[in-house]
Amino acid sequence: MKQIVLGCALAVLSVVLLAGCEEKKEVGAESAIMAPAGTKGREQNDEGVGHYRQGHWDVAEGHFRKAIQADANLAEAHFNLALALDKMDKHEDAKAEFQKALELAPTRVAIKDSPILKKHLGM
């Protein structure tokens, strides 16, 4: 019985410690989103997400543009490109990409409910 209790306590402690080690996100910062499985631009988009999360805006931009070349209807890539453009203070270009993302995926919660998208589109 003591071994079971000790095992459970160690499991809980491990979860708490791992949660404390998660990458800290900037308060209010938007997160780039992964592409759905099976989409043509998924690999490039998801590579861009990794660079975006590291603050490599220009590298992320290139990957998102390649994802869009592979699949022009990949809303996540348009949204992520807009986020990267916003970080580089290219707000007019970001606005156009946010608009395209919203047109392609008007019900995708991560896109339609995005505060930064709403700000750029005056919503």
Image: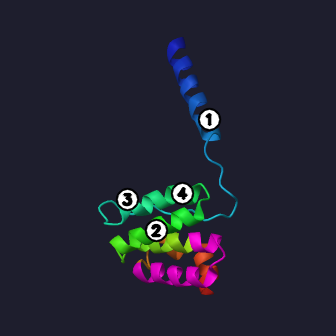
In front of the other: label 2 or label 1?
2
Q: In the rendered image, is residue 5 in sight?
A: yes
Q: Is residue 92 above or below residue 86?
A: below
Q: Which residue is mark 3?
A: 43
Tell me which segment is drawn in magenta: 84-104
- The residue sitting at 31% across, 66% down in the picture is 40
- The local crowd at label 4, few if under 14, some if 14 to 19, many if 20 or more residues have their Cα within 10 Å, is some
Classified by dominant secondary structure, the portion drawn in magenta counts as: helix
- Give the amino acid type for the residue marked by disc 1 in the picture: Val
Q: Is residue 92 above or below residue 51?
A: below
- N-terminal of the pair, mark 2 or mark 1, is 1
Secondary structure, mark 4, is helix
- Calculate the distance from the C-alpha at mark 3 to the C-alpha at mark 2: 10 Å
- N-terminal of the pair, mark 1 or mark 4, is 1
Residues at discs 3 and 2 in contact (Cβ within 8 Å): no
| Residue 101 x %, y % | 46, 78
- Give the amino acid type for the residue marked by disc 4 in the picture: His
Residues at discs 1 and 4 in contact (Cβ within 8 Å): no
Q: Which residue is mark 1?
A: 16
Q: Which residue is mark 4?
A: 51
| Residue 4 x %, y % | 50, 17
- Calculate the distance from the C-alpha at mark 2 to the C-alpha at mark 1: 35 Å
In front of the other: label 3 or label 1?
3
- The residue sitting at 52% across, 63% down in the picture is 60
Q: In the rendered image, is residue 32 in sight?
A: no
Residue furthest out toward the right:
27
- The residue sitting at 63% across, 81% down in the picture is 91
| Residue 8 x %, y % | 53, 24
- Give the amino acid type for the residue marked by disc 2 in the picture: Phe
In front of the other: label 1 or label 4?
4
Q: Is residue 72 above or below residue 84?
A: below
